[in-house]
Every structure is written in structure tokens, then in C-alpha cells.
Image (cartoon, rainbow, N blue to C red):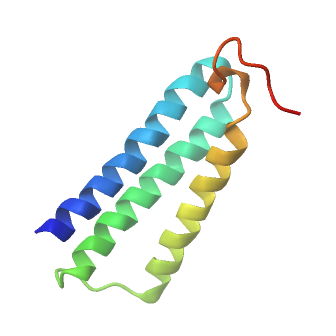
């Protein structure tokens, strides 16, 4: 039961983190980046939930699912990292490092 709670908590954390960034960048005209984040978070959470079911024997999937989940995590991290220097995500009054 603790494993399920831990996995669910991790998926919720991914969802909420991406949601917070999407909510900040979409109103500032970064719709393309927000869409990428939205797709990546749905993919990571969806495949992660499926992986959780597989881990407990409730489902069986092909190995390509694991590869797709890993690729989705890499894509989500890459888009979050590239979004970090957007002015809408920077705290007000803090100068940017060069």
C-alpha cells in the first residue's frame, strides 16, 4: 500500500509542478511551450499510472511503453528546463545571471 501511495504522490507532484508552470506561461503568450508541457504531463502521468498497475500485476504492456514513458519524462524535463529563464517565471526584481 505504501508503494502505491508513493507512486501516486510522485505522479501528483509531476502534475502539479507542470500545471503551475503552464498556468504562468500560457497567459504570457507561450502557448506552444504550454502545449508541449501539457502533452508531456498527460503522457508521463498516464503512462506512470499504467506502469503502477503493471508493477502490481494488474496489467501487462509491451516494453515500448517503458521506453515511451522514459522519453516523456525526458521531454518534460527538457521543456521545464528551457522554460526556467522565461521572464514570466522569474521572481520580480531578481536580476538574471549571465
Residue 35 vs residue 52: left or right?
A: right
> As drawn, which residue projects farthest toward the right?
98
Residue at x-position 67% and y-position 47%? 81
Q: Quadrant of the C terminus?
A: top right
Relative vertical location of residue 56 with respect to residue 48 in this rendering, above or below:
below
Relative vertical location of residue 40 with respect to residue 66 in this rendering, above or below:
above
Residue 19 vs residue 96: left or right?
A: left
x, y (%) of residue 43? Answer: 45, 58
x, y (%) of residue 50? Answer: 30, 70
Asked which quadrant contains residue 28, the reply is top right
In depth, the one of 35 and 54 nearer the eye is 54
Total numbered labels placed on residues in the image = 0
Relative vertical location of residue 56 with respect to residue 77 in this rendering, above or below:
below
x, y (%) of residue 45? Answer: 38, 57
Residue 53 vs residue 10: left or right?
A: left
Asked which quadrant contains residue 97, the reply is top right
> As drawn, which residue projects farthest toward the top?
93
Residue 46 vs residue 72: left or right?
A: left
In depth, the one of 98 and 76 nearer the eye is 98
Q: Quadrant of the N terminus?
A: bottom left
Residue at x-position 27% and y-position 86%? 60
Relative vertical location of residue 2 with respect to residue 14 in this rendering, above or below:
below
x, y (%) of residue 48? Answer: 36, 66
Residue at x-position 40% and y-position 87%? 62
In depth, the one of 96 and 45 nearer the eye is 96
Amino acid at each position: 500500500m505504501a508503494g502505491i501511495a508513493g507512486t501516486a504522490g510522485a505522479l501528483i507532484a509531476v502534475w502539479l509542478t507542470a500545471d503551475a508552470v503552464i498556468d504562468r506561461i500560457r497567459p504570457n503568450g507561450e502557448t506552444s511551450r504550454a502545449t508541449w508541457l501539457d502533452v508531456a504531463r498527460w503522457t508521463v502521468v498516464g503512462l506512470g499510472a499504467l506502469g503502477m498497475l503493471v508493477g502490481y500485476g494488474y496489467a501487462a504492456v509491451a516494453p515500448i511503453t517503458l521506453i515511451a514513458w522514459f522519453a516523456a519524462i525526458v521531454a518534460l524535463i527538457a521543456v521545464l528546463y528551457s522554460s526556467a529563464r522565461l521572464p514570466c517565471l522569474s521572481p520580480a526584481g531578481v536580476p538574471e545571471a549571465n
